[in-house]
Amino acid sequence: MINLDEVWRQLENVYDPELGLNVVELGLVYEVSEPREGELYIRMTMTTPGCPMHDSIHEAVERAVMHVFGVADVKVDVVWDPPWTPEMMTDEARAKLGF
Amino acid sequence: MVPPSTSHTPPFHVPIRYMLTGVASFLLFAVLLLVAGVRSGPPSPAPLWVTTTHVLTLGALLSFAMGASYQLVTVAFLTPIASVRGAAWNYWLYIGGLMGLWYSMARWWPTGLALFGTVTALAVIVYAVIILASIHRSIVRGPIRGFIQAAHVDLILAVLAVLSLIIAMRSGMEHGLEALLVTHIVLAMGYFTFLIMGFTLKLLPMFTLAHGHNERPTQFALWLLHGAVWTFILGEWLWGPLSWIGGALAVAAYLVFVRYIIDVIQRRVRRRIEWPIRAALAAVASGAIGAVALLAASVLGRSWLPMESVVSFYLLGWAAWTLLGYAYKVVPFLVWTHRFGWLAGRQKVPLVDDVLDVRRSRVVYALYGPGFIGFSISAAFGWTWGLVLFSGLLATSLGGFCLHMGRVLDPKWLWRVLRGGDVRP
């Protein structure tokens, strides 16, 4: 059984290196689940299709959660539906961007 | 929906080689500008000024633009470079031709001009064909495709125009030489304008995190620019007043483009606009002023407003300033991806801003802005003291830019990068 709270905490260590905000506060992570024992599924998006940080962030997410207790396999799906909008950010993230 | 990926990114050494050459050329341009300002007085077709101009256009601007294009085409069009090997090998053809061409210009060696001019022209055409072939495979549509395609078609035509000029000069032709030269210059300006406007459609919303803006009106800017380029050229060959229409169409294209820029800025999520982005925005304003100056020079006559000054203002204020702006964002990003991207998620890594604090760029822009404006005005009025003063300002600014880029690009990497080796620490 994977501790999904621990997965979310690990995801907070993955940053968009351009914006300086983590993927959780940016609202990029749509779903974290364990469909089968030991199999971690993450559904996420990027701020824009063709984001140059796509590969870096995708791989960083995989690496960040790989060593969480109970994780045997990780699948990260980058989806574009629904598309990311600024409203998905946390208030703190918006404040950091000067909103 | 198929998830777009950036796994098409070319090997690090492909774009960075060209960008490094661009940065080094900026440094050389700064030195030559200073020497030319002190020694030559007002710009004239003297070998030193011709060399200085081509160190800027063929070296700094084109080389950086080539490197950036190899990187950005994969991002903007979600497609790989049509021939990575071709792009890598073409660098050596390009650099060989460029060095020989600069030497031939400085010595005014006609045989060298013809030989190395042809080699450089070939390298530039190979680059343009690789980019066009890459875009051809892409499923991405929209205005950006039209802009980038138009840029590279114009570049090929600009090269063919200058090759025709060389052939015409060597065969002793007397008529049409000036028209060929103007055709070459207008097409080259078209290349930079289409390219900058095209990639701005991708870069500006990305760096300001803008959402919900409408880029469809830029389609009008695209067709207005096509009209501007070709009516201006036809005006030179057939009937002078056509160039008035060309100037007016260029102004209209900028107006549409500026409207788009305002829309993006109003819809940005990132409220604080970083200095490099401010520079890129200032460059758009300079480009618009340059287009007005082009119209004024066409209507009022070139004796009233020398075309050389308009071209110099356009190149320094629009093309070079845009490049100096986005370079502070693109180069640190590339270096970060290569040095730290593979460590992200495994350990704490610096942010892109830690690789280069972009606030440092404001000193460069504070010198560059007055520098290029003063330089262009001095060139227009033939003020020698102004040329010396503002060449110094520009050279200092560009020196600062090169220093910043040098800090990002650890010199120890340089040799390995140029050889195509892995520079990962």
Image: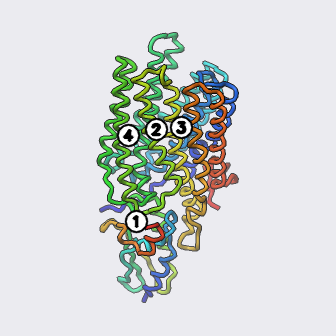
**Mark 1 lies on residue:** A46
Asked if disc 2 and disc 4 are in contact, CB closer than 8 Å, the reply is no
Question: Could you tell me the amino acid type at mark 4?
Answer: Tyr
**Mark 3 lies on residue:** B316
**Disc 2 packing (10 Å; few <14; some 14–19; many ≥20):** many
Quarter assignment of residue A45: bottom left
Residue B173: give its label.
none
Name the subunit of mark 3: B
**Mark 4 lies on residue:** B254
Q: Where, quadrant-wise, is the N terminus of chain B in this rendering? A: bottom left
Image coordinates for residue B223, horizontal then vertical, percent? 31, 37
- Residue at mark 3 to residue at mark 4: CA–CA distance: 17 Å
**Disc 1 packing (10 Å; few <14; some 14–19; many ≥20):** many
Report the residue at 40% width, 65% height from top.
Answer: A46
- Residue at mark 3 to residue at mark 1: CA–CA distance: 35 Å
Q: Do tags 2 and 3 sit on the same chain?
A: yes
Mark whose residue sits in front, 3 or 1: 3
**Mark 2 lies on residue:** B192
User: Looking at the image, which is closer to me, B386 or B141?
Assistant: B386
Q: Is residue B423 above or below residue B33?
A: below
Name the subunit of mark 1: A
Q: Do tags 4 and 1 sit on the same chain?
A: no
Task: Identify the element where label 1 is drawn.
Answer: loop
